[in-house]
């Protein structure tokens, strides 16, 4: 149904007739305006765009139901495609968001991804905000080996300058390794400092 057809349908209504919106909500029609119409939902009056009109009555038409299903499917397909692309990125890659901002990518989770803005702030972003890859950061072979070492010995207790510490995860920005002094107090070491502590424990000497 085109907007012109929706306007014709709305103009034929009487005050109080029920109208179903595209999102499934039922509205009590009040009156037509130029490009919008007035509708009442739970006693509150709203200006409603013509595009939101689905059909007269309290249920969605088959046409509207199919349109909603297709939109939902398109949104879901776009979500999975963006998530697939994010999974191919490496920490440090620069990406562009749909609002035009360029940030440094860190990692992707189930429904969000982690990025670092220009001021150094780290935030979670909805996957839908990802637009495209701007620049690939070359991998540092030495850093990758150190991170591999941290993953290999995660959970192991080593002696550091802070005392006995359990090796934890790599930080979201992939620049540090988390450790837990006496298994409780969390602190972070840069990759190089972590490697130095590992060498002091006769581990990772191959790097």
Image: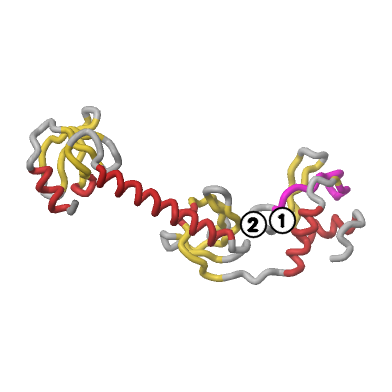
Read off the magenta span.
158-170
Predominant SS along the magenta part: strand
Query: For the residues marked 1 and 2, what is the alpha-carbon distance in whole angstroms?
Result: 8 Å
**Residue 88: % across, % down:** 59, 63
Q: Which residue is mark 1?
A: 176
Mark 1 nearby-residue class (10 Å; few <14, some 14–19, many ≥20): many
**Residue 184: % across, % down:** 77, 38
**Residue placed farthest to the front in the image?**
62
Taking the spot 18% from the left edge, 47% from the top edge, the residue there is 50
- Looking at the image, residue 145 sits to the left or right of residue 70; the answer is right
Residue 84's disc number: none
Q: Secondary structure beneath disc 2?
A: loop
- Image height check: is 97 above or below 68? below
Q: Nearer the viewer, residue 60 or 187?
A: 60
Q: Secondary structure beneath disc 1?
A: strand
Residue 173's disc number: 2
């Amino acid at each position: 149904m085109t907007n012109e057809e929706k306007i014709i349908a709305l103009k034929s209504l009487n005050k109080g007739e029920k109208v179903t919106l595209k999102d499934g909500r039922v509205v009590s029609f009040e009156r037509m305006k130029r490009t919008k119409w007035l509708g009442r939902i739970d006693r509150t009056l709203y200006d409603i765009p013509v595009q939101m009109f689905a059909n007269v009555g309290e249920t969605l038409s088959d046409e509207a139901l199919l349109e909603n299903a297709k939109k939902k499917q398109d949104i879901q397909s776009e979500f999975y495609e963006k998530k697939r692309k994010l999974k191919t990125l490496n920490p440090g890659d620069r990406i562009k968001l749909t609002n035009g901002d360029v940030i440094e990518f860190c990692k992707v989770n189930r429904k969000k991804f982690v990025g670092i803005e220009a001021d150094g702030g780290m935030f979670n972003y909805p996957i839908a905000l990802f637009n495209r890859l701007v620049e690939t950061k070359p991998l540092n072979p030495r850093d990758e080996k150190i991170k591999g070492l941290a993953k290999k010995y995660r959970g192991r207790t080593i002696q550091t300058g802070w005392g006995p510490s359990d090796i934890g995860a790599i930080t979201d920005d992939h620049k540090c390794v988390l450790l837990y002094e006496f298994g409780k107090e969390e602190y972070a070491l840069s990759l190089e400092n972590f490697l130095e502590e590992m060498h002091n424990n006769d581990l990772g000497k191959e790097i």
